Amino acid sequence: MFPEGTLINPSNNSLIVFEKDINNPDNEGFVCFWTITDQNSKQLVFKKRIDKKKAFNKYNNLLREGWKSYRNYDLAA
Protein backbone atom coordinates (compact mmCIF):
# COMPACT_ATOMS: atom_id res chain seq x y z
CA MET A 1 0.00 0.00 0.00
CA PHE A 2 1.07 3.57 -0.67
CA PRO A 3 1.71 5.65 2.48
CA GLU A 4 -0.94 8.23 3.27
CA GLY A 5 -0.76 11.13 5.65
CA THR A 6 0.43 14.63 6.30
CA LEU A 7 3.70 15.56 7.96
CA ILE A 8 4.70 18.95 9.40
CA ASN A 9 8.27 20.10 9.88
CA PRO A 10 9.70 20.99 13.33
CA SER A 11 9.47 24.75 12.69
CA ASN A 12 5.76 24.43 11.71
CA ASN A 13 6.08 26.28 8.40
CA SER A 14 5.89 23.42 5.86
CA LEU A 15 3.64 20.45 5.18
CA ILE A 16 4.17 17.38 3.03
CA VAL A 17 1.08 15.41 2.03
CA PHE A 18 1.22 11.83 0.75
CA GLU A 19 -1.87 10.93 -1.33
CA LYS A 20 -2.79 7.70 -3.11
CA ASP A 21 -3.48 7.79 -6.85
CA ILE A 22 -7.11 6.69 -7.18
CA ASN A 23 -6.31 4.87 -10.45
CA ASN A 24 -3.41 2.85 -8.97
CA PRO A 25 -3.64 3.14 -5.15
CA ASP A 26 -1.34 0.19 -4.35
CA ASN A 27 1.69 1.32 -6.35
CA GLU A 28 1.61 5.07 -7.03
CA GLY A 29 0.55 8.32 -5.54
CA PHE A 30 1.44 11.96 -5.13
CA VAL A 31 3.56 13.94 -2.74
CA CYS A 32 2.52 17.59 -2.25
CA PHE A 33 4.70 20.22 -0.61
CA TRP A 34 2.89 23.14 1.06
CA THR A 35 4.19 26.22 2.85
CA ILE A 36 2.22 27.67 5.73
CA THR A 37 2.01 31.41 5.16
CA ASP A 38 -0.43 32.24 7.95
CA GLN A 39 -2.30 30.37 10.67
CA ASN A 40 -5.18 29.51 8.30
CA SER A 41 -3.42 29.96 4.96
CA LYS A 42 -1.36 27.42 3.02
CA GLN A 43 0.25 27.67 -0.42
CA LEU A 44 0.98 24.73 -2.72
CA VAL A 45 4.62 24.74 -3.84
CA PHE A 46 4.60 21.56 -5.96
CA LYS A 47 2.84 18.24 -6.49
CA LYS A 48 4.74 15.25 -7.86
CA ARG A 49 3.82 11.70 -8.84
CA ILE A 50 5.89 9.14 -6.94
CA ASP A 51 6.05 5.35 -6.75
CA LYS A 52 5.46 3.34 -3.57
CA LYS A 53 9.12 2.53 -2.82
CA LYS A 54 10.31 6.14 -3.13
CA ALA A 55 7.31 7.35 -1.12
CA PHE A 56 8.08 5.02 1.80
CA ASN A 57 11.74 6.04 1.73
CA LYS A 58 10.82 9.74 1.73
CA TYR A 59 8.21 9.29 4.47
CA ASN A 60 10.65 7.40 6.74
CA ASN A 61 13.47 9.90 6.10
CA LEU A 62 11.20 12.80 7.05
CA LEU A 63 10.20 11.09 10.30
CA ARG A 64 13.88 10.54 11.15
CA GLU A 65 14.54 14.24 10.47
CA GLY A 66 11.96 15.23 13.09
CA TRP A 67 8.81 15.77 11.02
CA LYS A 68 5.61 14.90 12.90
CA SER A 69 2.21 13.63 11.85
CA TYR A 70 -0.18 16.54 11.28
CA ARG A 71 -3.93 16.42 11.76
CA ASN A 72 -5.93 19.49 10.87
CA TYR A 73 -9.28 19.57 12.59
CA ASP A 74 -10.82 22.60 10.85
CA LEU A 75 -14.52 22.67 11.58
CA ALA A 76 -17.02 23.47 8.87
CA ALA A 77 -19.59 26.14 9.60
Image (tube, rainbow, N blue to C red):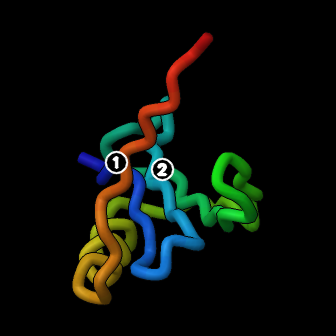
Q: Which image quadrant: the C terminus?
A: top right
From the viewer's perspective, tell me whether residue 58 is left or right of residue 36.
Answer: left
Mark 2–mark 1 CB contact (< 8 Å): yes
Question: Regarding mark 2 in the picture, which secondary structure is present there?
Answer: strand
From the viewer's perspective, tell me whether residue 60 is left or right of residue 40.
Answer: left
Amino acid at circle 1: Glu
Please name whichever residue, 67 or 50, is drawn nearer the observer in this view of the structure: 67
Eye-nearest disc, 2 or 1: 1
Residue at image coords 30%, 68%: 68
Q: Quadrant of residue 10?
A: bottom left
Q: Please, is residue 60 above or below residue 22 in the view?
A: below
| Nearest to N terminus: mark 2 or mark 1 | 1
Q: Is residue 53 visible?
A: no
**Looking at the rendered structure, which numbered label has been put on residue 29?**
2
Amino acid at circle 2: Gly
Disc 1: which residue: 4
